């Protein structure tokens, strides 16, 4: 379980904090969606949860983050990847730069952790299979499309087999079938008891896989609750988030029934 | 003569065996041609101790001694650029990393060595993308020499700044995958290392004192 209490974070040299007094609980096997406009603090939240902020990026942090009941501050940086896996929105910068093939790229993380060779091969093959990219195993990761690189980046996290996964817009460069694959993989992971926090603009994906959703605005949690309720909240549009397509369709139908001329317009 | 023998034995012969001769010659020509031309022109026409005259152009005298010296320098340049190119063409960053680690080099050092090799194509890709983007915004990169020179700054600036900006993201990505963990990493595979390759390596190591002694004794001219 990941628990965040009164968390505030300010990037080095920033005028205002990127996160302000955030409280969150991410239970085992739960998928928590995070939404919000640009600059609302979503990426910063991911960096803090993965222990990269402030350790790697600097800045000042207050509040408490505990991972499975252990204060994250007491853990060493190199202990964290086995506990919390993180994926970023730009897959190109997540490539190690030293792997000649996708298989080696996905194996890079667990190899760093000293996982025995047989298990390393097993983990890597399973991670590739989970995202249906086994056919890319011998390809040069630097020569893949952005969408394929994104799937490789996610497979690289799965191969670490962390207890918690934090993903920052994991489907940003994916087409609908790639997005569906990621959704399937995350649902399977959650079924194995892994807790998942996923930042997404694609609210249709969150409506499918998330049990709860939080909305950030100016670094604060402004909405929190069951995914169905938060994603249908009328305030979402004001927060710069497009509701899922079923919510938009329902609203369009209600508006059209109240005002039949709109229905005529839609028919035309 | 010495550098030419070295090029033939230590660069061309291995390149033929590795099947990269054509790529090697093309790359070495690209790397060394401009320097070679300037070395030949300057030494042939302005060699101070030349006596055997080849031809005269006004006050300038081309000498055979200048030509011989220029050819020796060019042979050395070809030997150096050929050796580096051969290494680049026959060694993947992954092989380099794994082999260095297998021999006990700390993973960080091995990573720096191999990622330096990998940086070249990445930077080229970035430069190509930025050049296309700048040209789409009206930058003249095909006009006069002056226009081309002016066009360098808007391309080189973003290439370098982009690479620097990427360092933090790449650092985070590496840390998130346990790169800073102390201790040995698991090696997925071992590069091929046949008895012939090991013999060739030992011969190369032994060749160093032999060549140094031969040079000191004046056997190499």
Image (spheres, coloured by chain):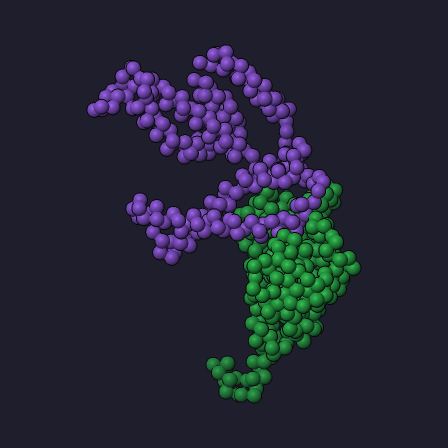
Q: Quadrant of residue B187?
A: top right
Q: Residue at x 58, y 73 (%)?
A: A239
Q: Residue at x 31, y 44 (%)?
A: B145
Q: Is residue A250 visible?
A: yes
Q: Is residue B75 above or below residue B141?
A: above
x and y, in percent, of residue B80 in the image:
47, 28
Q: Nearer the viewer, residue A60 or A153?
A: A60
Q: Is residue A84 left or right of residue A265?
A: right
Q: Quadrant of residue B56?
A: top left
* Chain B visual colour: purple
Quarter of the figure with the N terminus of chain B: top left
Q: Is residue A236 above or below residue A42?
A: below
x and y, in percent, of residue A167 in the image:
64, 59
Q: Tag count in the figure?
A: 0
x and y, in percent, of residue A117 in the image:
72, 41
Residue extending furthest left?
A: B58
Q: Is residue A168 visible?
A: no
Q: Is residue B178 above or below residue B20?
A: below
Q: Nearer the viewer, residue A75 or B138?
A: A75
Quarter of the figure with the C terminus of chain B: top left
The green chain is A
Q: Is residue B81 above or below residue A172?
A: above
Q: Is residue B125 left or right of residue A167?
A: left
Q: Residue at x 69, y 50 (%)?
A: A77
Q: Residue at x 68, y 55 (%)?
A: A51
Q: Nearer the viewer, residue B22 or B162?
A: B162
């Amino acid at each position: 379980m990941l628990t965040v209490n009164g968390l505030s974070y300010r990037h080095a040299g920033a005028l205002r904090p990127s996160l302000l007094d955030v409280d969150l609980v991410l239970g085992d096997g739960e998928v928590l969606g995070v939404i919000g406009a640009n600059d609302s603090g979503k990426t910063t939240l991911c960096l803090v949860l993965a222990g990269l902020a402030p350790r790697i990026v600097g800045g000042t942090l207050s509040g408490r983050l505990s991972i499975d009941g252990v204060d994250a501050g007491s853990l060493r940086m190199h202990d964290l990847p086995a506990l919390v896996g993180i994926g970023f929105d730009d897959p190109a910068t997540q490539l190690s730069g030293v792997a000649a093939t996708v298989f080696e790229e996905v194996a890079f993380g667990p190899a760093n952790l000293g996982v025995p060779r047989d298990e390393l091969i097993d983990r890597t093959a399973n991670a590739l299979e989970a995202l249906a990219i086994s056919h890319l195993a011998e390809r040069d990761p630097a020569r893949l499309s952005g969408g394929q690189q994104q799937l490789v980046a996610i497979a690289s996290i799965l191969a670490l087999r962390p207890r918690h996964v934090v993903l920052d817009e994991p489907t940003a460069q994916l087409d609908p079938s790639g997005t569906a694959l990621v959704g399937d993989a995350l649902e399977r992971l959650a079924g194995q008891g892994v807790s998942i926090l996923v930042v997404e603009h694609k609210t249709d994906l969150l409506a499918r896989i998330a049990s709860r959703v939080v909305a950030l605005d100016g670094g604060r949690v402004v909405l929190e609750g069951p995914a169905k309720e938060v994603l249908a909240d009328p305030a979402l549009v004001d927060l710069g988030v497009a509701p899922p397509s079923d919510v938009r369709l329902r609203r369009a139908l209600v508006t059209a029934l109240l005002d039949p001329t709109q229905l005529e317009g839609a028919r035309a | 003569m010495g550098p030419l023998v070295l090029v033939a034995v230590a660069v061309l012969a291995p390149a033929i065996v590795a099947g990269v001769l054509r790529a090697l010659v093309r790359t070495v020509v690209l790397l060394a041609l401009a320097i070679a031309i300037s070395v030949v022109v300057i030494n042939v026409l302005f060699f101070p101790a030349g006596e055997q005259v080849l031809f005269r152009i006004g006050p300038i005298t081309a000498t055979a001694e200048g030509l011989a010296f220029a050819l020796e320098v060019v042979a050395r340049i070809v030997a150096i650029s050929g050796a580096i190119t051969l290494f680049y063409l026959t060694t993947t960053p992954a092989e380099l990393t794994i082999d260095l680690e297998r021999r006990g080099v700390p993973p960080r050092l091995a990573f720096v060595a191999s990622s330096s090799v990998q940086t070249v194509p990445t930077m080229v890709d970035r430069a190509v993308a930025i050049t296309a983007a700048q040209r789409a915004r009206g930058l003249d990169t095909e006009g006069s020499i002056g226009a081309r020179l002016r066009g360098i700054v808007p391309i080189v600036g973003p290439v370098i700044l982009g690479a620097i900006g990427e360092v933090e993201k790449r650092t985070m990505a590496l840390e998130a995958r346990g790169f800073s963990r102390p201790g040995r990493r698991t090696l997925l595979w071992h590069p091929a290392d046949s008895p012939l390759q090991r013999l060739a390596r030992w011969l190369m190591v032994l060749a160093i004192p032999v060549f140094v002694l031969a040079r000191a004794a004046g056997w190499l001219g």
